[in-house]
Image (spheres, grey):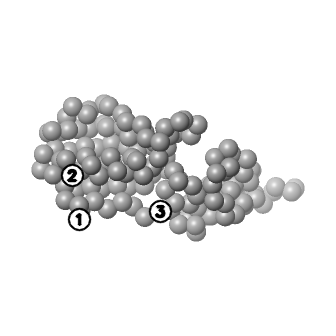
Amino acid sequence: MLAIEKTRSGFRVDIRGELGGIEGSLRHRLGHARPWRLCFTVCSGDASALQGKTADFATLAGAQEEIHRLARALGGSETDMIWPQETAKRTALSSAAVAAETFGLPQTVFRDRDSAGWGHTNSVAGRLANAELWLTTLPSRYFA
């Protein structure tokens, strides 16, 4: 079984199979050459040697491939391996609006190869240079 839950900073990963289990997280680290870090926090059975280890990946797709490889190695079936849906535009827009009001800065809704769907960040962030942009939302007091 492979259970993946989207979190604010990435994903929570839970892999269970006949040969052991892995609990960990997949986090996105801005400004790194290999921005996706897979951290193994609790490991059992054949996976116990991975306890406390990390693995870095250049892309989200590379990290997903490794997670699926581990799940197969622990005896999981392909039909159990479901990756969460990408973040929808509507969800990203509502989060961006809240962040704009909270911090008083414009927020741009975007997606790129590492964002796992649509996300938002400040409108001058460097990662927007190679991203698909959708909308920038301004806080209500922006022109006040």
Q: How far across and how far down the image is residue 44, in percent?
A: 18, 39
Give the Cα separation between the discs numbered 3 and 2. 23 Å
Residue 57 marker: none
Which circle marks residue 86 in the picture?
3
Total numbered circles: 3
Residue 50 vs residue 64: left or right? left
Hey, what amino acid is under mark 2?
Answer: Arg
Above-or-below relation of 23 to 54: below
Mark 1 to mark 3 CA distance (whole Å): 19 Å
Q: Looking at the picture, how far across and down is residue 128, in whole percent?
A: 66, 51
Res 108 quadrant in image: bottom right
Q: Which residue is mark 1?
A: 79
Q: Residues within 10 Å of mark 2 (few under 14, many from 20)?
A: some
Q: Which residue lies at the image location 31% right of the left edge and 48% below the top edge?
A: 67
Q: Which residue is mark 2?
A: 72
Query: What quarter of the picture does the N terminus occupy?
Result: bottom left
Q: Nearer the viewer, residue 25 or 78?
A: 78
Q: Amino acid at mark 1?
A: Thr
Q: Is residue 34 above or below residue 70?
A: above
